[in-house]
Image (cartoon, rainbow, N blue to C red):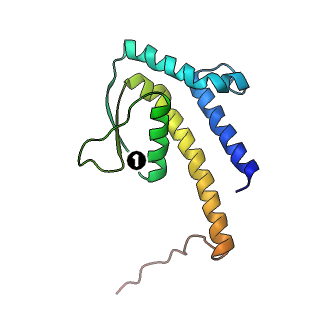
Amino acid sequence: MNENDLSKLIEKLKRIEALYSGAATPGEEKAALNAREKIKEKIEQCRDADPPIEYKFTLADAWSRKLLLALLRRYDIKPYRYHRQRYTTVMARISKSFVDETLWPEFEELSHELRTHLNNITEKIISEAVYGDSSEPEEIKAISG
């Protein structure tokens, strides 16, 4: 991955955040810079009308977990887990409307972008360093006995 690819990915992720902040023009630099504050304002508005409840997020992989933890902390939401809960579990107290309208849709979009990027990098590295064909195996009919 070169510096230009990384810069493009970071800019795309910032535009996604600006979109979920409710900015009228997500492409503007100012909107991107103010996105976090606008989302924090949304959290406060939701908190008044929709008090926080305990959420349990179960994530499939370490990348998704790291992303969700970063999003929660970015918006001053304290993630935690209980003793003996799985490592892939993240708990947080947050309003349902904020999760439904902002946090989860933003997480899913960011997660999709990151997974796509990581998959592309993985394919490239395997192709160049291991073997050029990393396609799925051929599917054959089961041998009947």
Location of the C terminus (image quadrant): bottom left
- Residue at 67% from the left image edge and 22% from the top image edge: 31
Residue 46 on image: x %, y %: 42, 17
Name the spot of residue 78 as percent of width and height, x first. Answer: 38, 32
Where is residue 50, by image quadrant? top left
Q: Is residue 44 left or right of residue 22?
A: left
Q: Secondary structure at mark 1?
A: loop
Q: 127 or 30, which is in the foreground?
A: 30
Picture layout, residue 111 above or below residue 21: below
The picture places residue 119, in percent across and down from the top left corner, at: 59, 58
Residue closer to the observer: 135 or 120: 120
**Residue positioned 60% across, 52% down in the render:** 116
User: Please, is residue 17 above or below residue 114 in the view?
Assistant: above
Residue found 49% across the figure and 38% down from its top: 70
Q: Which residue is mark 1?
A: 59
Residue most extreme to the right:
4
Amino acid type assigned to the residue bearing label 1 in the image: Leu
Along the line of sight, the residue nearer the viewer: 18 or 100 = 18
Tell me if residue 76 can be seen.
Answer: yes
**Number of numbered discs:** 1
